Amino acid sequence: MGELHVPVMLDEVIDQLNLTFGGIYIDCTFGAGGYSKKILSTKECKLFAIDQDPDVIQFAKQIKNDNFIFINQNFGNLSEIAQENKVKEVDGIVFDLGVSSMQIDQTERGFSFNKSARLDMRMSQQGISAWEVINQYSEEDLADIIYYYGEETFARRIAKKIVNSRPINTTTELASVIQEVVRQKGKINPATKTFQAIRVFVNDELKTLKKALAAAYDLLKVNGKIVIVSFQGLEDRIVKDFIKDNSLKSSKIIKPSFDEIKNNPRSRSAKLRTIIKAGGNQND
């Protein structure tokens, strides 16, 4: 399984939630259960945890608490999940966006260009895989995906090289193809943006996030909070636009401490934003 996902800004997330006794909360990205365990141990409350990855069910089963309910679904289905569980309103909701350390460290999942594995990248382990996108999509479509979802300047050059190098079966093969046309600058691997783009596309992450944020806000009680930890610009932009477009109240951005970045380098790009549901008729 590799090392478990280390929850980023754990104390800050709990502080922002401002947990209340008997409150109802949703952890939309359960993972290995870091946030969920902390929520349950901090205050006696009811917690619904959601994760589409079937591999995390084993961690959910380890939580022996009558106030804990795990749902193995995509958080894009938040409205339906709430209805099915007869949840009308909640005190707080947490999102820890992007791919988890646990998924990256599982070589066979095909998320990492540092370990050779069949191209996959499906968080739910269902639906279209990265292999199908890389080997079956047109050069134009590939270029659009890499440019839009990875913000990659050399998208067209990369797409052309991919098409001319097919079949590409593994993560390391794809990384090598990209490295042939994009030079490395600094410590960032030239394949980073393309891998991000394919992963985001395969899992429909941006559309899912937009849908989930709207559903989450609808579920909040007045003064309830949505706490979101994002790791890349596209996710953070969606959160910012959601706040702006709906004239919502939000708190100041929080970033990881120097010590946290030192101990968990994957936290370095994280941003924590908190959306607060104001009273009155706002956004009704």
Image (spheres, helix red, strand yellow):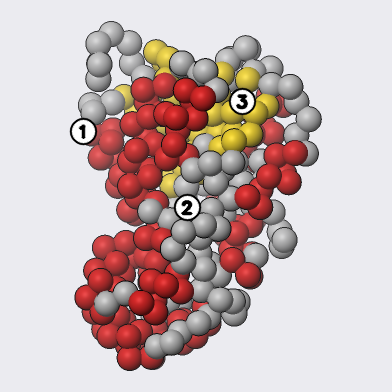
For the residue pair 56 and 100, the one nearer the viewer reads as 56
C-alpha distance separating marks 3 and 2: 21 Å
Q: Mark 2 is on which residue type?
A: Gly
C-alpha distance separating marks 1 and 2: 23 Å
Q: Mark 3 is on which residue type?
A: Leu
Q: Is residue 186 left or right of residue 125?
A: left
Q: Would you call the spot at circle 3 few (<14 residues within 10 Å), some (14-19), or many (20 or more)?
A: many
Q: Residue 2 falls in which quadrant of the image?
A: bottom right
Q: Would you call the spot at circle 1 few (<14 residues within 10 Å), some (14-19), or many (20 or more)?
A: few
Whether pointer 3 and pointer 1 mark residues with C-beta atoms closer than 8 Å, the reply is no
For disc 3, the marked residue is 47
For disc 2, the marked residue is 98
- Mark linked to residue 245: 1
What residue sits 38% from the left and 45% below the top?
A: 208
Q: Mark 1 is on which residue type?
A: Asp
Q: Is residue 11 left or right of residue 74?
A: right
For the residue pair 244 and 52, the one nearer the viewer reads as 52
What residue sits 23% from the left and 26% below the top?
A: 247
Q: Pinpoint residue 24: horizontal percent, then vertical percent.
A: 56, 19
What residue sits 55% from the left and 58% below the top?
A: 125
- Mark linked to residue 133: none
